[in-house]
Image: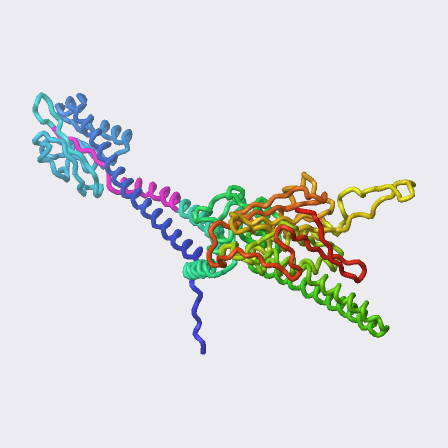
Amino acid sequence: MRSFRPRPRSLAGQLFAMQVVLIAAVVAGGAFFAYVSGSARAEETARRQVRAAAVAIAGSPSVREAIRTPDPSSVLQPYAEQVRADTGIAFVTIMDPRGVRWTHPDRSRIGETFLGHTARALRGETFEETYTGTLGPSIRVVTPVRDGGRITGLVSAGITVERVSSQVRAQLRALSLGAAGALALGGIGTYVINARLRRHTHGMNAAELSRLHDYHEAALHAVREGLLMLDGQRRIALINDAGRELLGLGPEAVGRKVDALALPPSLTGALLASEPRGDELHLTADRVIVLNSRPVVGGEQRGTVVTLRDHTELQALSGELDSERGFSQALRAQAHEAANRLHTVVSLIELGRAEEAVGFATAELELAQVLTDRVVGAVAEPVLAALLLGKAAQANERGVELVLAEDSRIDDGVLPDTLAQRDLVTVLGNLIDNAMDAAAEGPGAPVAVAPSPDGGPMAAHAPARPRVTVTAVAEADARELLLKVADNGPGIGRDDAEAVFRTGWSTHGSGRGLGLALVRQTVRRNGGTVELGRGPDGGAEFSVRLPIGDRTGRGNGATRATGATGTGAGTSTAATTSTTGTRTTASTTGERA
């Protein structure tokens, strides 16, 4: 049989019990102190009252004159009773020096001997004592009556202890009522406060709160996602280690407002937003961050909970995957085109036109080789060369002419190890992709016109073919890598020159607009610059400059490879690819980026 263990009292319950006991103890202590103080004060008041009465009676001339008469009682008894009634004391006894009473509240006691001490009074002193007489225990004062320097009588005035106790009991009843009221008010106030505390602590006891705090701290430090908690004033109430790392903040960030942290504007706006945000991409100086936020519900704007995930590596891998996907699609298309050309060669041979078949095949071979030779001859960096060849194939499939400018040259070993190949792919790949999109929209330059051969009306030339021109320069004695990508598309307006680098800006609908933001982030991370201008063909031209400085571990040669077509240095032409129907041609241009 399972034993029943009562659940430990909640923290609010423990505090309530403790506070009730404390209030009760304080009220009881106050009441006891007030009782003791009141008792002492009542007794002291009684002593002062009877002393004043006794001294006043003893000093009265009428009392001295009455004592000289043969029957002092006849005069002093009415006088003593009048004083007793006026002052509210218990008795006034006037006696001769031997202690024989001349007055007493009980007339039958007149003539009897005073019960109490008189020796000190006979010596001329006025003294106080508590003594049990005919009226019971009393607080009394005895003082001498002097007549011409001689003690002719004694006066004793007193008040019974019972009367003093009754006065204290009356005060105690009032004090008890006040103490009970204070205890009730304290208990009600404590209950209200602890009910609120119970709601805030959800009825948990101290051990549960301590354990929850330990779990909370362990979870904050263990979770790899960034976690921020903002209060209603948009101040950081809590941030874990991963959040500080992702946002580049220090321990002093707690308590500061979000708009004072010098974060990117888009990220600051997302943190300040009151509505929920889901899987939003934002760029910091060197990271791609996915943000989710949700306000804290509770009838008022209590704050916001924000989670941050680092997607820098994932975004880079996604870009590489997109490039690989584009390469594979281009290869499939080229395989299809190669099959078409092979069928053409076979058909020419079957028709007995072998010479034409050989000429067609030779032309196609030279066409396929010229771009490869041009890229390999100008760009000694394998990753960039592969990227350019892949992008050329993609451009060919989209009907865009990809041109490698004739002054492009990247010598072997000039790029340092600190410049990551992935960053080069991110920068150049995104710039070429955006340039191909812009060029595919249609040329931005005006259509040229020329006279007809027969002297007739002016005839318009066909619009310029979509073209992207790439320049890549990093020679052996250079201190920077220059990458230029220009297109002949519609261009970018001056008002949008800065907006194009913001996350989400795109002319191709929602879900786009991250490429150029990644380009600027990558360039800045590597200490370079990116500029937007107008290209020679009327479209946009992006210029990226990356410092390469000291170079180690990437070879010490500065040899430029040459292709099979063997164009000499200084006379090399820009290789292009183009598609006319299913026919691929090669051309040379004198255009420079």
Specify whether residue 513 is in view. Answer: no
Q: Residue furthest bottom?
A: 1
Q: Which residues are magenta?
A: 153-179
**Residue 289 is drawn in which quadrant?**
bottom right
In this image, 345 relative to 576: left or right?
right
Seen in the picture, residue 514 relative to 98 is either above or below; the reply is: below
User: Toward the viewer: 468 or 130?
Assistant: 468
In this image, 316 relative to 109: left or right?
right
Q: Where's residue 122, x and y in %?
A: 8, 32
Q: Residue 165 lies in magenta, yes or no? A: yes
Q: Residue 560 lies in magenta, yes or no? A: no
Q: Main secondary structure of the magenta part?
A: helix
User: Toward the viewer: 525 or 1?
Assistant: 525
Seen in the picture, residue 125 relative to 201 is either above or below; the reply is: above
Q: Residue at 34% of width from left, 50% of height from top? A: 25
Q: Where's residue 502, x and y in %?
A: 62, 46
Q: Where's residue 109, x and y in %?
A: 19, 37
**Residue 2 is drawn in which quadrant?**
bottom left
Q: Residue at 63% of width from left, 60% of height from top? A: 563
User: Toward the viewer: 397 or 132?
Assistant: 397
